Image (cartoon, rainbow, N blue to C red):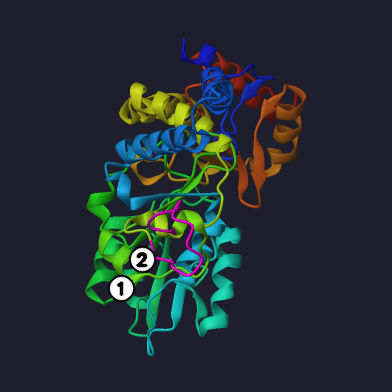
Amino acid sequence: MMREKYAEQRGIYLLSHSIGLPLKQSQADADDAYWRAWRQADTDIWPQWFSGIDNFRHQLSELLQTQTKNICPQTNISSAVGKVIFSLPATASKKVILLCEDDFPSIGYALQQSHHIGYQLRYLPKDADLHDVATWEQHLTGDVGLCLITHVQSNTGRRLPVAQITEIARQRSILSLVDIAQSVGIVPINITQWQADFIVGSCVKWLSGGPGAGFLWVDSAMIERCEPRDVGWFSHQAPFEFDIHEFRYAEDALRFWGGTPSVHPFLVAASSLQFVNSVGIAHIEANNVALSSCILEQIKPEYLVSPRAHHQRGGTLILHFGDHHTAVTESLERHAVQFDGRAKGIRLSPHLCNSPAQIAHLLDILESAQLGV
């Protein structure tokens, strides 16, 4: 069973949208890759660590159907966004960054810093239908220089039509930044179909790769145009050249890397990515849809906040139980169901670490809570 490949669970773990349950094998793989370099005293350590990080980039490029040269490891998404903002080619007239209220706040915080170089943020109306391409057509105006598109929104579970939005942006010479934190590892993604300029993501959620292994994807044309300010020796074309007077940007996306990187998080994530690629994203999505459907068939339609159609949402079901909501959440906590809540409802994310039996037990808990027993 797939569930046995994951770390031991306490109760029913349904938090893959927040912190994915780690794989048992990832600990062994990462520890071996990290400590092997120290055990072999006659070899250089950095090349061995580079090999592990290169494997991370390779596995990620396979998952996203792109080229390794376009991927740069990052500590987290916010750092990646900051590096993007302060690397953009100068423009005089397009100084608005367009985003929406349901984007992840941490990215908003990073984008706010763009005021230092003359940008201002503009938010789509709170009641705007973000799935409607007409909304984006209306608000992607001539003064917009960059738009943030969240592939799957964490508060609603809604999946946005990224390719259609980026097409509008391209036609209007607006750069696009896509956040795939809530979709990578659970929704099939083919980056070449989007033709975005920048894509950011993390391995901490559905990929079960733990914190510290974020990433930035940069379109090949944008790599040549961008000159990041936050640089270090790993942004250098030849990191081990060690000439303090001579800095040359790396020719690929690694120019966005910076100083000495963390290593162990990428070794953990490389192992989990390899597992995801071996299982196949189509199988992972199908498993999520099947388990989610079991839940959807048993709850009242009015309790569902996220879209019902699986192609319109990510892997998370967001539910609000109306008058029964407090009773339901308290019952879930008593029965050690691992979930979290936001203003719009609780979030439940079935994944490979869950079994049909667990989902059946979850439904029993939900039904009993609503009946007051």
Residue displayed at 43% across by 59% down: 236
Residue 103: x and y in percent read: 52, 60
Q: Earlier in the sequence, mark 2 or mark 1?
A: 1
Q: What stretch is highlighted in magenta?
A: 236-249
Residue 200: x and y in percent read: 44, 53
Secondary structure beneath dot 1 equals helix
Q: Dividing the picture into quarters, in which one does residue 336 lie?
A: top right
Q: Quadrant of the C terminus?
A: top right
Residue 343: which disc? Answer: none
Q: Is residue 128 left or right of residue 39?
A: left
- Amino acid type, mark 2: Ser
Residue displayed at 40% across by 27% down: 274
- Amino acid type, mark 1: Glu
Residue displayed at 58% across by 23% down: 31
| Magenta span contains residue 273 | no
**Location of mark 2 (residue):** 176
**Location of mark 1 (residue):** 137
- Alpha carbons under labels 2 and 1: distance apart: 14 Å
- Can residue 369 be seen here? The reply is yes
Q: In this view, does 346 lie above or below 163?
A: above
Residue 264: x and y in percent read: 57, 34
Return the residue nearer the eye: 302 or 97. 97
Residue 113: x and y in percent read: 58, 74
Q: Is residue 226 above or below residue 203?
A: below
Residue that protrudes farthest toward the bottom in the picture: 92
Q: Is residue 132 above or below residue 30?
A: below
* Label 2 crowd (10 A; few <14 / some 14-19 / many >=20): many
* Label 1 crowd (10 A; few <14 / some 14-19 / many >=20): some
